[in-house]
Amino acid sequence: GRVIFLVIVNMIWSGSINVLFSSWKLFGTLIIAFVAIALVFLILTSIYRKVSAWLLLKKSIPPFLVALTTASSAAAFSSSVMTCEEKFGIDPSLIHFGIPLGMVMHKPISAVYNMLLVFFFAGKFGVSCSISWLIVAVIICSIIAISTPPIPGGGAIAYTIIFAQMGIPDEAMAVALAIDIITDFLITAFEVLVLPLSLINISYDD
């Protein structure tokens, strides 16, 4: 609560509060993007495994809800393991190796989120976006998504690096942290949703 209060006070002090109010379009875009990515995983897994995408989604809901309500992949860990083992029938050895590793390395949602955040602030603060800028943005956002520590405040480290490299003003940091308070729940939930689907495909290959 204190962190949120300090972030908002800082935005008012720096004059960035209007950028926060205009971020509703970003939230809409993020939700659409996250759902689209999840659908791609579901459809590809459905085709690959020759099983209903709706059935895959139903079986994936419990860990998704845990992550959505806690914003913690660690809290959803046991539910993810149970879902993979009991509902998807994945080899336990793959589960106990793949889920902990995937919680750190498997970050398609975070990578897309970082990119959308960069585009949003680049537009708001008038940062010029050339082809080389876009290429660097994709590379940095992907690397940062994987390297960001899954701890409270990890986003602050990530945004500092990304914004500094992409020429986005420091004023964007306060807004990014305020947005992160909400989006962290969505990002974690969708990451938890798509990880078991990737393990299903790996298991199928084996």
Image (cartoon, rainbow, N blue to C red):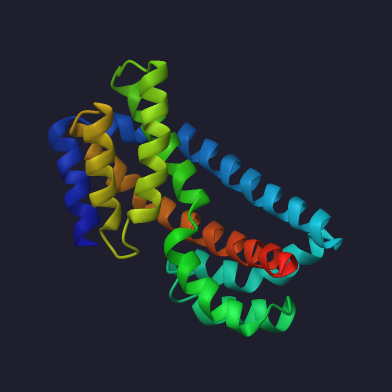
Whether residue 170 is visible: yes
In this rendering, the answer to whether 169 lies above or below 60 is above
Using the rendered view, name the quadrant where residue 17 is placed.
top left
Pinpoint residue 33: horizontal percent, then vertical percent. Answer: 58, 41
Left or right placement of residue 57 versus residue 12 in this view: right
Describe residue 178's horizontal placement relative to residue 105 as left or right: left
Q: Is residue 79 left or right of residue 149?
A: right
Which x, y percent locates residue 36? Answer: 65, 43
Nearest the viewer among 129 and 26 is 129
Q: In the rendered view, would you say 150 is above or below 182?
A: below
Q: Nearer the viewer, residue 97 or 167?
A: 97
Residue furthest left in the image = 13
Q: Quadrant of the C terminus?
A: bottom right
Q: Height in image: 134 above or below 115?
A: above
Which residue is painted at 40% across and 37% down in the image?
A: 139
Q: Is residue 21 left or right of residue 12?
A: right
The reply to whether residue 22 is in sight is no
Q: Point out residue 67 in the picture as x, y percentages from the top left corner.
A: 50, 68
Q: Residue at x 38, y 20 (%)?
A: 132
**Picture residue at 65% right of the left edge, 76% below the top:** 84
Q: Quadrant of residue 51?
A: bottom right
Residue 179 horizontal/vertical position (percent):
36, 45
- For image coordinates 39% across by 50% down, the residue present is 145
Image quarter where the N terminus lies is bottom left
